Amino acid sequence: MEKIIVVLVILMTVQWAAFLTVRYKKEKELSCLTEYLMKVQDSRLLPPPEDFSEGHAGILASEIYKLVVQLRERTDVSQKEKEYLAKMLSDISHQLKTPLTSMGIMVDLLKSRELTEEMRIRYASNIERQMERMTWLVKSLLTLSKLDADMIQMKKERIKLRELIYEVIEPFELMAELRAIEIKTVLGEEIILECDRRWMAEAFSNIVKNSLEHTGEGGRIEITGEKNNFSTNIYIKDNGTGIEPEELGHIFERFYKGKNSPENSVGIGLALSKQLIMLQNGMVYVKSEPGKGTQFHVKMYSEVRI
C-alpha cells in the first residue's frame, strides 16, 4: 500500500512539474512575444522573429512580422506617391507660370498706343504660341492622369501604317520646311497595324516632334517600317545632336529634360508616348550617339491585347 502511495505521489509530482514547465514555457513565449511587439512598435528597423519556436507563438510572431512588412511597404508607396504628386504639381505650376508671365507682358505691351502695327502682330503671334503651348501641356497632363487612373479604353482598329505616319508628319511639314529638314518615309503599302488610331498617332507625334527639336537645319529624319510573324517594327531615325549615354536611361521619365532639350521643353512627350505604346502591347526602345543622331524603335507585337 505504501508503495502505491509513493508511486502516486511521484506521478503527481511529475505531472505537476510538467504542468509548471509547460506553463513557464508559455509564459516565457508570451513575454517574448510582448517584447517583440514592443520592438515592432518602437523600432523603425523591423526585427525578424528569429527567437521563436515553431509553436503557436512562433506562428503568431511570423504573421505579425508579415503584416507589419506589408503595412510598411504600403506606407512607403503612399509616401512616394505623395512626394511624386507634390513634385508633379510643382513642375506643372512652373510650366504654366512661364507662358502666363510671358502672355501678361505681351498684353501690357499691346495696350501701348505708340506700338507699331508690325510689333502688335509680333506680340499677338507670341501670345498665340504661348496659348498653343499651354493647351498642349494641359492636354498631355490630362492624358497622363487618365492613363494613371486606367480611364483610357483603347479601340482596336486595322489601319495602314503608311496612312498613320502620313497623318502624323503632316502637322510638322511646315516646321521641317522652314528649317530645311527632310522627312523621308520608307513604308510598305501592305503593312497593317492593329491599334487605336488616335492614341497611336499621339505616341508617334511626340517622337517625331522630339526628333525635329533635336535635328539642326538641313538635317534628315527617316521613318521606316517592317513586319514579321511576331511584330511590326517602326524606326524613327534622325541625324541630330544625339543623346548622352548617361541620359538614355531617363528620357522616358516624366518631366525629364536633357541638357540639349529646347528651352520650352516640358519633358512629358516621350513619357506619354511610352505609356500609350505599352498600353497597346508594344514597346519603344532608343539608341543614340552624341553628335550623330538618335533612333527610336517602336515594336508592336502581333497579338494585340486591348
Image: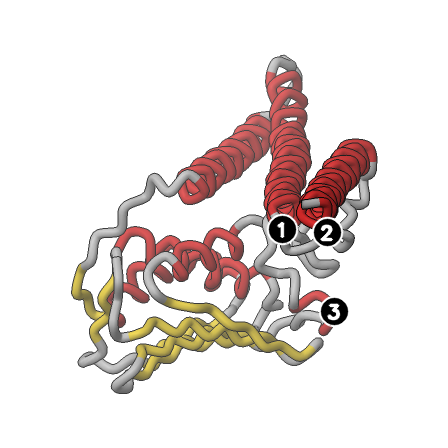
Residue at position x 66%, y 49% from top? 58
The coloring applied to the image is: secondary structure
Residue 69 makes an appearance in the image: yes
Q: In this rendering, would 37 be left or right of 103?
A: right
Quarter of the image where one finds residue 98: top right
Residue type at mark 1 is: Gly
- Mark 3, residue position: 246
Q: Secondary structure at mark 2?
A: loop
Q: Secondary structure at mark 1?
A: loop
Where in the figure is residue 195, as x and y percent of width and height?
Answer: 25, 61
Q: Nearer the viewer, residue 12 or 294?
A: 12
Residue at position x 74%, y 69% from top? 246
Please identify, in this view, whether the residue under mark 3 or under mark 2 is nearer the observer.
2
Q: Are marks 3 and 1 in contact (CB under 8 Å)?
A: no
- Mark 1, residue position: 55
The label on residue 196 is: none
Q: What quarter of the picture does the C terminus occupy? A: bottom left
Where in the figure is residue 48, as x and y percent of width and height?
Answer: 74, 51
The label on residue 52 is: 2
Q: Nearer the viewer, residue 8 or 256?
A: 8
Where in the figure is residue 56, as x and y percent of width and height?
Answer: 60, 46
| Of pointers 3 and 1, the one earlier in the residue sequence | 1
Residue type at mark 3 is: Glu
| Label 1 crowd bin: few (<14), some (14–19), many (20+), radius 10 Å | few
Residue type at mark 2 is: Phe
Q: In this view, which residue lies farthest toward the bottom?
A: 228
Q: CA distance from mark 3 to mark 1?
A: 53 Å
In the rendered image of this protein, does residue 200 appear above or below residue 287? above
Q: CA distance from mark 3 to mark 2?
A: 48 Å
Q: Are marks 2 and 1 in contact (CB under 8 Å)?
A: yes
| Label 3 crowd bin: few (<14), some (14–19), many (20+), radius 10 Å | few
